[in-house]
Amino acid sequence: MNRSSSRWVLATYVVYLLLPLYWLLSMAVSSNADIAGDFSVLPRSPTLANFAEIFSNPVWYQAFGNSLTYVAINSIISLTVAIPAAYAFSRYRFLGDKQLFFWLLTNRMAPPAVFLLPFFQLYSAIGLFDTPFAVALAHCLFTVPLSVWILEGFFSGVPRELDEMAKIDGHSFLYFFFRVFLPINRGAIGVTLFFCFMFSWVELLLARTLSGSTAKPIAVVMTRTVSASGMDWGVLAAAGVLTVLPGALVVWFVRKHLAKGFALGRVS
């Protein structure tokens, strides 16, 4: 395939990827009557009423707040637990380390539906049901093992001589870890944050089961966008556009490190 053909294939693929996003944005600035009317590539009468409905209706903006809250809690907990665990796996050898490391990842292999009933009963018993913490802790079962796996690959790529040099120079372990080691691996932390955010942001099954009327996330509200006149397509599309934006921002900030993160594997 020559260069010209490759460009045409790439351009076609990009258009194919962007078309659903354009159509979503087009529906977000259209009324329900225009959406249900005749086919049109461009919006007939663009309007921001759908976005105004989301920002003025507490059901919508509180749902966005709930989603951002448990995603942030999950990301913080996952990184707080995974960073020291990944460092231990990358620097020390102990009995059963490889078996434990593999066992962590097997938790990620299980579908979320397996844990619905145990989580529901446990959180109902201790009073965590219908709170952002319930969803965040449930997501940690999947994001913590994945975070450890990713960070261990990055940390193992840092020479151990760096630890020894810091010790020879008289630096304490805490100084070395927070002022030297973590800044070197800020790209690894960014990639891990991306995976934690994306899993928690788009996961629906656990979020829907473990939340009620108080901590209802945006994904749940979007599945119930029905009025007396039928499905409110314009508001649903506007919510979809706003839902895409946080993920796009995270990808933008860690874009330089994503390729390396996807290519990482277990370093023995």
Image (spheres, rainbow, N blue to C red):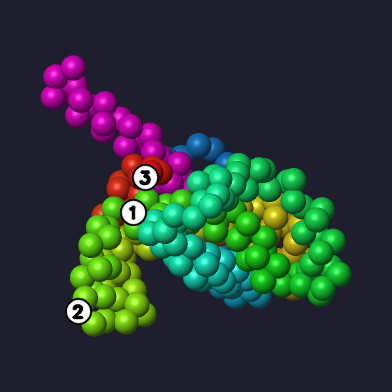
x then y, percent, for residue 162: 23, 65
Dominant SS type (magenta): helix
Select label 2 or label 3 by which is in front: 2
Foreground of the two, 259 or 26: 259
Identify the magenta region.
1-29
Sequence-wise first label, 1 or 2: 1
- Given contact means CB atoms under 8 Å apart, are the residues at marks 3 and 1 in contact? yes
Residue 13 in the image: state x and y as whole percent: 33, 32
Whether residue 264 is visible here, answered yes or no, is yes
Quadrant (top left, top right, bottom left, bottom right) of the C terminus: top left
From the image, tell me which residue sits under label 3.
267
Amino acid type at circle 3 is: Val
Q: State the residue position of label 2.
A: 169
- Spatial separation of the CA atoms under disc 1 and disc 2: 22 Å
Give the structural element (helix, strand or loop) at label 1. helix
Q: Is residue 87 magenta?
A: no
Mark 3 closeness class: few <14, some 14–19, many ≥20 residues within 10 Å: few
Residue with the mark numbered 1: 156
Instruction: Indicate which disc, 3 or 1, sits on the residue closer to the N terminus.
Output: 1
